[in-house]
Image: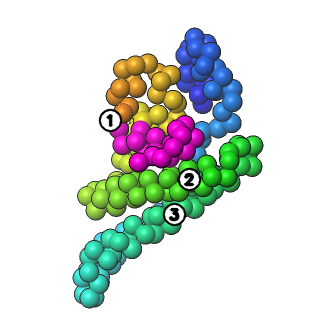
Amino acid sequence: AAPIVCAELIRAKPAWREMVDGMATVATQSAQLWLKEDERSLGWSRQLRLTPLRPIAYVAVKLVLAMVIGAVSVAVAFAVGSLSGAELPAHAWIECGLLAWACALVFAAFGLFMGYLLPSENVMQILGPVLAVLSFAGGLFVPVDQLGHTFATIAKFTPVYGVGEIARYPLVHDGNMW
């Protein structure tokens, strides 16, 4: 899609042309299981209130599950990268993977918060576009320095920019992150 959407920019900037030529794909595919009813309408929330389970424990279990799914996502992305010819020192694979996984906690908490804030049938309709825009604005799809100074300045104020910087740290900086 990048050659179609960014055709003028690709023609104008050699760095963009090189990036797009080297990019196998940025398309992602997601699978979701849609149930007719959500937890609230099935009475699960009421059932939980009748048990001695504390609400914080329920939230913690949901966050742990989200982190497990995040670990699988990072592992799959790294496996695809490795099989596609990406080469990194072993320590960089491990450090980048652990940092990317740790940063998933931000989005796990955000998703959980939005799941409680919004009606369940609307959560993905809202979060999908919001996360896509934040990912673009934060420099996950295109390096922010390729889009100009103003865009690079704005990108630093998005949460996705920080997550990307942390996850890429072992690749672009020497020494200790702290």
For badge 1, the amino acid type reads Phe
Question: Mark 1 = which residue?
Answer: 157
**Mark before the other along the chain sequence, 1 or 2:** 2
For badge 2, the amino acid type reads Glu
Q: Residue 95 carries which label?
A: 2
Query: In the structure shown, which secondary structural element does the residue marked by tag 2 occupy?
Result: helix
Q: In the figure, residue 73 lies in which quadrant?
A: bottom right
Residue furthest top in the image: 12
Q: Nearer the viewer, mark 3 or mark 1?
A: 1
Q: Which mark is residue 40?
A: none
User: Is residue 37 something one can see in this rendering?
Assistant: no
Question: Mark 3 = which residue?
Answer: 69
**What is the magenta segment's predominant secondary structure?**
helix
Question: Marks 2 and 3, how far apart in space?
Answer: 18 Å
Q: Pointer 3: residues within 10 angstroms few (<14), some, or many (20+)? A: some
Q: Which of marks 2 and 3 is in front?
A: 2
Question: Marks 1 and 2, how far apart in space?
Answer: 24 Å
Question: Marks 3 and 1, how far apart in space?
Answer: 27 Å
